[in-house]
Amino acid sequence: MTNREASFPASQVSMGLADAPAAVADGPERAKRFERTTYRIANWVRSPRPYLMLLGFALFFAFWHLTVEVWKLPRFAQLPGPTAVISEWLSPDPTYGLSLYSSQYYQHIWVSLRRVSIAFILATATGVPLGLFLGWSQRFKEYVFPVFELLRPIPPLSWVPLAIIMFEGSETPIIYLTFLASFYATTLNTMLGVESIDVSFMRAAYCLGAKRRQVFWHVVVPGSMPFIFTGLQISVGVAWFSLVAAEMVSGQYGLGYLINTSYTMVQYPTMVIGMITLGVVGYATSAGVRMLGNYLMQWRAHELAMGGDK
Amino acid sequence: MPMPAREGAIAAEAPFRPARRGKGEIRIRNVVKIYGSQESGIRAVDDCSLDVPAGEITVVVGPSGCGKTTLLNAIAGFHSITSGTIDLDGEPLCGPGRLKADPGPDRIVVFQNGALFPWKTIIENVAFGPIVQGRLSRKEACDKAGVMLAEAGLCNLEDNYPGEISSGMRRRVEIVRALMNDPKVLLLDEPYRALDSLTKSVMHEALLETFDRNQVTIFFITHDLEEAIFLGHRVAIMTTRPCRPKKILTVDIPHPRNYSVLTAKRFREYLDETIAAVHEEALKAFAAGERER
């Protein structure tokens, strides 16, 4: 990162997307951002929102606790209650052998996270370029899109047998299934992103003397970013979705596997621990993608912030 | 002045002051644009001939949907024409054999809703043209952009994104972005339509000032008649679809103009004359709209 004071501001200007964030980490700018962040946090704490959120969680746990452990409603009585789950989760010596203190727990998380990451990265690396070309070239779309639309409705789970035949071992088929769901979401959203760009931007670029390739890099790619990142958030969500399904079918580790084996071995609290962990990890990855998107699209944050002054 | 191919269209042209600059003269001859098939398609522009003298502001007014923008798109090279020719400084832009001009930095469009790239900062936007054309290095382009922005009175905006500045500022930056390329012609497609009237008046003065400084040929589309007369050396009033010049008014009020002109007697006379001509067309457009439905 360069420091703005040290160099002439104009020389800092970047035309590409990738180096845009370089302009952000400068001294005064950083201080301003820190101030803005603390201000936002202070505002948030003063507002009723965090308390409503806590109340929501409290109500949820109370409902769970009452239906399962207090009233023991029919069909609910067999479920593990929140106290059982939480005490198992926090116990250094868990009844069913899995808690925050066991290394196995982290291994399950790690294996799942790794599979999702590989699948997500592959899906992004292939889906974004494919979507860009689909939106950019009518000819290319005419060839590819019908096939794509035919394959898309096939649920990833129905690929299980084919995936097992196609790929060796258990790891690759799982990653493949996870990749599939992710890939469709990313590609489709990227394509829609390109198609959503106002034609004036392309015309303006051509007017200013840009060649077709330059229009692609300077207009099409950044212009479709908002849609791409919406797509990536959906994509990381569906990646977890099909990962767990795939892990239930095969595999030795992973949260989906954990949930499934806990079920067959009647270790219900462990099963729920797996589910809650999925929720937390899934939320974290999705938030990570969102943060990356906001970081790369600061122009958009500014635009939204100025929304009132049109 | 080249001889007009058709009478009528150019008839209203008085002996005119010589062009202050030799470049940027657009000559439109017998242009036809039909959307759809030759027989049943919509005739947006029909047998339209118009001169846009170099170094002047030519304003085109007409009812909405009359085909003004079609004409502008043909000059800019966004759309093809069906027949006719359009020349820029004697060089054919489009005509028989090549019905669509290539868009290029000699004719830059400023769009109705603005087209500053929201993902680039102001200075990146302004420096965009020379960089993609490979005319200037990034550093040179940015230096020049800084100077041009400062000349236009747009300081300290360099590192902002377009979303952070007001829409009036954005229009002015867009014009600076166009002028960076030293265009022969600026094509403005109702650029101030979305602005409130106070901002508009500021924009007009800024545009005239820019014009006085750069002497670039301006082709300006609007349906605001006061705007048309205030800005234009010549006002071309177009017929409703199909579009062709109905009347060409030479506004003999010397440049540089300022807002005191608006209350001048001569200005009101021009306005009356324009309103009469446009109103007739607006009625026709309205009636045609009724029939189509």
Image (cartoon, rainbow, N blue to C red):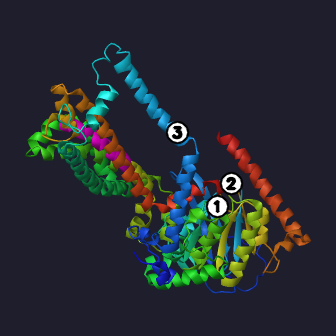
Looking at the rendered structure, the secondary structure element under dot 3 is helix
Q: Which mark is residue B64?
A: 2
Residue at 23% x, 32% y is A270
Q: Which mark is residue B68?
A: 1
Residue A275 in the image: above or below residue A124? above
Looking at the rendered structure, the secondary structure element under dot 1 is helix
Q: Amino acid at mark 1?
A: Lys
Q: Would you identify the image quadrant in which residue A112 lies?
A: top left
Residue at 38% x, 54% y is A135
Q: Which mark is residue A183?
A: none
Residue B220 in the image: above or below residue A195? below
**Which residue is under mark 3?**
A51
Image quarter (top left, top right, bottom left or bottom right) of the N terminus of chain A: bottom left
CB under 8 Å between discs 3 and 1: no
Residue at 75% x, 52% y is B282
Residue at 17% x, 35% y is A97
Principal SS element in the magenta part?
helix
Label 2 marks a residue whose chain is B
Relative side of B281 to A51, left or right: right
